Image (cartoon, rainbow, N blue to C red):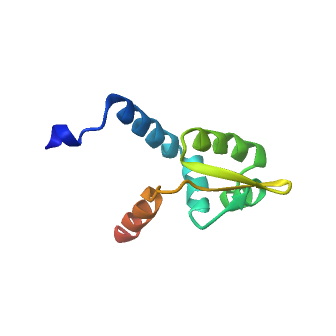
Amino acid sequence: AALAAMPSEEGIAVMADRFKAISEPSRLKILLALSAGELCVEHIAKAVGAGQSAVSHQLKTLKDNRIIKSRRVGKNILYSVEDGHIMIEVAKEHLHCNE
């Protein structure tokens, strides 16, 4: 059963890359901010206490790993958590259980 449930080597590599992407504290803060809903870079920067340039760099990594998505509305680009990624909610619940 364990062997049948094991993802492919490619799938494991993708999973590992995604976990690496969210393990960096500034990217995790961005993801936590986005878990509340769609935000533009300016609002993300305010929420996490970082500069817009630094946030943009981290957003690229998160987007490249398909953890977040973006959409253009006029001149703004809005970022949100990619569909199906509930790991942040699970992590937040676990954190509150241990406080």
Which quarter of the rendered picture does the N terminus lie within?
top left
Which residue occupies the extreme left position in the image? 1
> Residue at 44% of width from left, 42% of height from top?
19
Residue 93 % position (x, y): 40, 68
> Residue at 55% of width from left, 53% of height from top?
82
Residue 23 % position (x, y): 48, 44
Residue 20 % position (x, y): 47, 39
Q: Looking at the image, is 50 positioned above or below residue 2?
A: below
Q: Looking at the image, is 63 positioned above or below residue 12?
A: below
Task: Give left or right: position of 74 versus 8.
Answer: right
> Residue at 38% of width from left, 30% of height from top?
10
Task: Give left or right: position of 5 versus 69.
Answer: left
Q: Nearer the viewer, residue 40 or 54?
A: 40
> Residue at 45% of width from left, 64% of height from top?
89
Residue 67 % position (x, y): 54, 48
Q: Nearer the viewer, residue 10 or 37?
A: 10
- The count of marks equals 0
